């Protein structure tokens, strides 16, 4: 029986293990939408904005270790999703974008939605292709799946013209091999072994793929045997934490924090990480944060097997050394009005076993790594590319990837508004996500940055642009309006009671925590 291009593509995707599609379709994608009923293995998840589509696919890929698909409506739809695709690019998340386009014969008429999609896909520095015939679209889909999953993971973009989608003659593509991580050469491991044995102050900086259990255990053995310090990159795509695992501190967000953390370091060893730089330029301050006189060494780069290299290194320098593991310990339950510190103690005291934490608490969450260090084992997904509006959609995708695990979203108020419609998708899909919105009624981080960049003359007009009051955002009303039960907490006792109840009940919940700004 003949199938059309859309059916061929969908069957190819599910054949390659891509069985979830986050979608916000339009007219040019209607044949793909119709084809979903002929491919029941594909789960289609509707989101109301493309930024939630792409963010959810990012969260899914980080936790599942394999790609979800997106369905985006032409160039403008992709443009709406680019910020969270930027975060996915920085996270090296495997992800397949299916971008609808005008029928090939229609493109020359410059219809209102015509745009330069190639410019948008090129901006992501991933893999891109435009399908030209129904006979080729299956093979193109298989190539996209393989490209997305090849080490270290990337965004693969497949442009699907409407006539390729609706025309008969589709052929299901044969799956292509995935390029695995490349082993690190023995000589390089031996070189780093000499460095960590030197007795000089040494730091191992853990990056992509090395902040999961195997990498953490191996790195901890090396540190315990040699005295080297361990840090993870500031915003890891996924880091495993909690009791029974090594507690590895992340580099700070502020340049001053990193300079303090790396002070007196003579050797910096990069493991799937880049040499640290300041997030922004500041007048009169350095962009590079490696201390003067510090030598930078590379154990592994992206695309190489950093975890395997760490294990090899540990066998070389720490053969009889056990890792140092975090003990099970929780903060005491606080009381009184919520503060930037005590709300994090509530989370640390109550965080459930095997939780997935989508952390976009920003300035309100600076204490979270400390107060949750000894909580039951959990995963943390962070803001890899710095483009805010990630927390809620990443939590959505993680919940679909891991339906048997509780998801906790720690979400700042300003960035919540970028993708607040994620709550509607959580309600529609019945996802087990407990969201704590930290409402300090300000872009607090920008208040801090206003002084740090040395801006002069800031007065009422400047401060108004950093203020989220007048009118106040009401996240209880917003959440309930999208079908998510919601409560408000002003004290630690209220937050503890509401958080515990939300965790105990299935489905999504929102708690609006009224926390004063840190700055």
Image (tube, grey):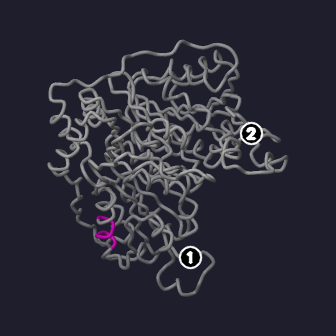
Residue extending furthest front? 293
Classify residue 211 as left or right of residue 435. left
Q: Which mark is residue 115?
A: 1
Is residue 518 positioned above or below 189 on the image? Answer: above
Q: Residue at x 54, y 31 (%)?
A: 434
* Quadrant housing the N terminus: bottom left
Q: Which mark is residue 412?
A: none
Q: Secondary structure at mark 2?
A: loop
Give the magenta part as a residue range. 137-142
Q: Are marks 1 and 2 in contact (CB under 8 Å)?
A: no
Whole-percent x and y of residue 431?
Answer: 49, 37
Q: Residue at x 61, y 52 (%)?
A: 284
Q: Residues within 10 Å of mark 1 (few under 14, many from 20)?
A: some
Is residue 360 positioned above or below 320 on the image? Answer: below
Whole-percent x and y of residue 337?
Answer: 70, 18
Classify residue 76 as left or right of residue 307. right
Q: Residue at x 60, y 75 (%)?
A: 113
Q: Secondary structure at mark 1?
A: loop
Whole-percent x and y of residue 50?
Answer: 55, 57
Q: Foreground residue, 64 or 288?
A: 288
Q: CA distance from mark 1 to mark 2?
A: 35 Å
Please tell me in which quadrant of the rendered image residue 6 appears: bottom left
Please tell me in which quadrant of the rendered image residue 471 appears: top right
Q: Label 2: which residue?
A: 473
Whole-percent x and y of residue 112?
Answer: 63, 77
Q: Foreground residue, 235 or 289?
A: 289
Residue extending furthest right? 460
Q: Foreground residue, 473 or 241?
A: 241
Q: Residues within 10 Å of mark 2 (few under 14, many from 20)?
A: some
Residue 457 lies in the magenta-colored region: no
* Quadrant housing the C terminus: top right
């Amino acid at each position: 029986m003949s199938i059309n291009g859309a059916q061929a593509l969908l069957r190819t995707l599910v054949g390659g293990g891509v069985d979830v599609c986050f979608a916000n379709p339009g007219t040019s994608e209607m044949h793909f939408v119709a084809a979903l009923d002929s491919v029941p293995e594909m789960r289609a998840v509707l989101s109301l904005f493309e930024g939630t589509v792409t963010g959810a696919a990012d969260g899914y890929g980080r936790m599942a270790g394999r790609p979800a698909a997106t369905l985006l409506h032409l160039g403008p739809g992709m443009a709406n999703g680019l910020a969270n695709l930027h975060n996915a690019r920085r996270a090296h998340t495997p992800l397949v974008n299916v971008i609808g386009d005008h029928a090939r014969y229609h493109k020359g008429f410059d219809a209102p939605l015509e745009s330069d999609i190639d410019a948008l896909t090129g901006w992501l520095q991933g893999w891109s292709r435009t399908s030209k015939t129904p006979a080729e679209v299956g093979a193109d889909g298989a190539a996209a799946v393989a490209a997305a999953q090849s080490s270290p993971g990337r965004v693969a973009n497949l442009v699907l013209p409407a006539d390729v989608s609706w025309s008969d003659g589709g052929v299901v593509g044969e799956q292509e091999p995935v390029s695995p991580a490349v082993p690190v050469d023995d000589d390089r491991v031996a070189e780093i072994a000499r460095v960590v044995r030197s007795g000089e102050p040494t730091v191992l900086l853990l990056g992509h793929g090395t902040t999961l259990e195997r990498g953490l255990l191996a790195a901890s053995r090396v540190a315990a045997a040699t005295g080297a310090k361990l840090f993870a990159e500031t915003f890891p795509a996924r880091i495993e934490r909690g009791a029974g695992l090594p507690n590895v501190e992340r580099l700070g967000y502020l340049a001053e924090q990193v300079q303090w953390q790396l002070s007196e370091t003579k050797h910096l060893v990069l493991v799937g990480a880049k040499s640290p730089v300041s997030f922004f330029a500041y007048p009169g301050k350095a962009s590079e944060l490696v201390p003067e006189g510090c030598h930078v060494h590379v154990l592994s780069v992206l695309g190489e097997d950093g975890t395997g290299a760490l294990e090899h290194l540990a066998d070389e320098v720490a053969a009889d050394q056990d890792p140092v593991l975090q003990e099970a310990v929780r903060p005491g339950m606080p009381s009184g009005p919520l503060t930037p510190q005590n709300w994090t103690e509530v989370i640390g005291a109550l965080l459930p076993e095997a939780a997935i934490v989508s952390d976009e608490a920003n300035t309100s969450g600076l204490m979270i790594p400390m107060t949750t260090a000894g909580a039951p084992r959990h995963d943390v997904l962070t803001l890899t590319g710095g483009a805010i509006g990630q927390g809620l959609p990443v939590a959505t995708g993680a919940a679909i990837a891991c339906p048997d695990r509780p998801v906790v979203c720690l979400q700042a108020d300003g960035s919540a508004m970028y993708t607040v419609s994620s709550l509607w998708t959580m309600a529609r899909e019945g996802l087990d996500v407990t969201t704590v919105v930290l409402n300090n009624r300000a872009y607090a981080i920008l208040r801090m940055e206003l002084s740090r960049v040395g801006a002069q003359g800031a007065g009422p007009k400047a401060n108004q642009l950093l203020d989220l009051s007048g009118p106040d955002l009401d996240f209880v009303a917003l959440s309930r309006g999208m079908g998510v039960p919601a409560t408000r907490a002003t004290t630690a006792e209220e937050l503890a009671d509401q958080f515990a109840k939300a965790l105990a009940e299935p489905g999504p919940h929102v708690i609006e925590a009224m926390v004063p700004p840190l700055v």
